Amino acid sequence: MERKELIRTIYLYLFSFIGLVLIITGVVRLVDLGLKVYVFTKADEVVIYPYSPSLDLIKENSDKDIESIIQEQEKYRQQQIQFEKEDKIRQRHRAVANSLAFIIVGLPLFIYHWLMIQREKRG
């Protein structure tokens, strides 16, 4: 009977620990995201490296003038910046959803097993 109680105790503490780890992980990720959004705003900034007209592209399109090629590249650059900003928002939404999922799963797991441990200690 003593071995059964030991296994049960290990089980309860292990799952309490797992629940606690999930909660802490979720909270840490939410704090990280909050700090990036509100305090360290440069940490999450979109960076697009400058793009200059390629000589090969200009030679291939000799019928177009250089100005129109530069305009096309600027249009592409603006589209790229817009895509990067939208992608950053999607990444933040995924991070919040994942963090909340960790907390939602970890909280009941921890509370249930911890209360079982406390009940066994009292009785």
Image (cartoon, rainbow, N blue to C red):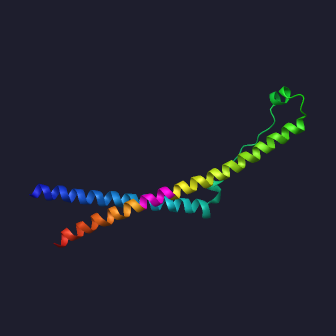
The number of numbered badges drawn on the structure is: 0
Q: Outermost residue, left direction?
A: 1
Depicted 112 relative to depicted 54: above or below: below
Q: Is residue 52 magenta?
A: no
Residue span colored magenta:
97-103
Depicted 119 relative to depicted 53: above or below: below
* Secondary structure, magenta segment, majority class: helix
Q: Position of residue 100 (x, y in %)?
A: 46, 61
Between 87 and 6, which is closer to the camera in this rendering? Answer: 87
Residue found at x 79% / y 44%: 75
Quadrant of the rendering where the C terminus is positioned: bottom left
Quadrant of the rendering where the N terminus is positioned: bottom left
- In the rendered structure, the answer to whether residue 106 lies left or right of residue 98 reads left
Residue found at x 76% / y 47%: 78
Residue found at x 85% / y 26%: 59
Q: Where is residue 47 in the image (x, y as percent from the top left)?
A: 69, 48
Q: Where is residue 116 in the image (x, y as percent from the top left)?
A: 24, 66
Depicted 19 relative to depicted 52: above or below: below
Residue found at x 29% / y 65%: 112
Q: Where is residue 109 in the image (x, y as percent from the top left)?
A: 33, 61
Q: Outermost residue, bottom direction?
A: 122
